Image (spheres, rainbow, N blue to C red):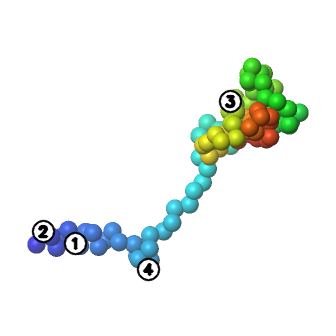
Amino acid sequence: MRWLATVAALLGCAPASGGQAPRATRTPYVPETLAGTPASCSKALVADLKGKRWDPARVEAVRTRAKARTIRVLGPTAAATMDYSPDRLTVQLDARSRVVSIECG
């Protein structure tokens, strides 16, 4: 009798639409403190760095110039998170430490 109640409970959990569960959609995570606020980062302010050799000693100066709250510098084989942060400056380098892209977010 107990197993019958268990089976009935499990059947109630089965998806109703043709045996397939609905697929989840991925949306970028935007922290509550940033939702609805304009991004403060401006890649245009540091666009002149593209193609130039990266100087690690200037990280803070570049971050300040771009009006970004945070900065990350990624090498050619670096892994990066896919979270969206509108006030973060991302600098992508090639194998010779030259700036290949500058993005906010």
Whichever of callouts 3 and 4 sits on the residue coming sooner in the sequence is 4
Location of mark 2 (residue):
2
Residue 18 shows which numbered tag?
A: 4
SS at badge 4: loop
Mark 2: which amino acid? Arg
Whichever of callouts 2 and 3 sits on the residue coming sooner in the sequence is 2
Crowding at mark 4 (Cα within 10 Å: few <14, some 14-19, many 20+)? few
Tell me residue 59's x, y (percent). Answer: 74, 24
Alpha carbon of mark 2 to alpha carbon of mark 3: how far? Answer: 57 Å
Residue at image location 52% in from the left, 62% down from the top: 24
Q: Is residue 17 above or below residue 58?
A: below
Q: Is residue 78 left or right of residue 38?
A: left
Q: Is residue 11 above or below residue 92?
A: below
Residue at image location 35% in from the left, 72% down from the top: 14
Alpha carbon of mark 4 to alpha carbon of mark 2: how far? Answer: 28 Å
Q: Is residue 6 left or right of residue 96?
A: left
Alpha carbon of mark 2 to alpha carbon of mark 1: how far? Answer: 9 Å
Location of mark 3 (residue):
70
Mark 4–mark 1 CB contact (< 8 Å): no
Between circles 2 and 3, the one closer to the viewer is 3
Location of mark 1 (residue):
7
Alpha carbon of mark 3 to alpha carbon of mark 1: how far? Answer: 53 Å
Mark 3: which amino acid? Thr
Whichever of callouts 4 and 2 sits on the residue coming sooner in the sequence is 2
Whichever of callouts 4 and 1 sits on the residue coming sooner in the sequence is 1
Mark 3–mark 1 CB contact (< 8 Å): no
